Amino acid sequence: MSALSLRLPDSIHRHIKEIAKREGVSINQFISSAVSEKVSALLTEDYLNERARRADRGALKEILKKVPDRDPQPGDKL
């Protein structure tokens, strides 16, 4: 595990301290979790962008042609 010295505005530190206490975790655990969530979101975005880049629109249209033409189920229509 690595140690990291981090400078934060007093207001952000105060919010982190309050939220961590409310959640019943340490400030370190809270910050670690928050950073992990952000990293996960960015990696997911990269993954989805890469998948979209490789997408084949023609294949998608062929798949959509197989979907039956029916009225929406009750509650699915605006």
Image: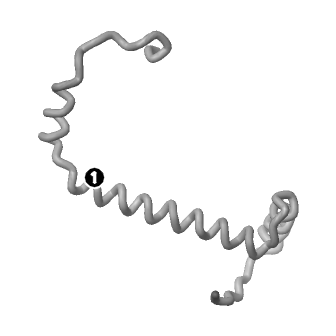
Identify the residue at image location x=75%, y=76%.
28
Name the quadrant containing residue 9: bottom right
Give how far across and how far down residue 72 sits, in percent: 37, 13
Q: Compared to 36, does 8 lie above or below?
A: below
Give the tally of numbered discs. Answer: 1
Give how far across and how far down residue 29 sits, in percent: 74, 72
Judging from the image, the colouring scheme is one colour
Name the quadrant containing residue 33: bottom right
Give the labeled residue for mark 1: 52
Left or right: 1 in relation to 59: right
Name the quadrant containing residue 20: bottom right
User: Badge 1 local density, few (<14 within 10 Å), some, or many (20+)?
Assistant: few
Identify the residue at image location x=64%, y=87%.
1
Identify the residue at image location x=36%, y=61%.
47
Q: Compared to 61, does 8 lie above or below?
A: below
Task: Give, as a three-letter code, the residue at label 1.
Answer: Ala
Give how far across and how far down residue 36 sits, in percent: 59, 68
Identify the residue at image location x=84%, y=62%.
24
Q: Compared to 28, does 34 lie above or below?
A: above
**Which element type, helix, strand or loop, lies under badge 1?**
helix
Left or right: 34 in relation to 69: right
**In this view of the protein, which residue sits in the foreground, 29 or 78?**
29
**In this view of the protein, which residue sits in the foreground, 12 or 69?**
69
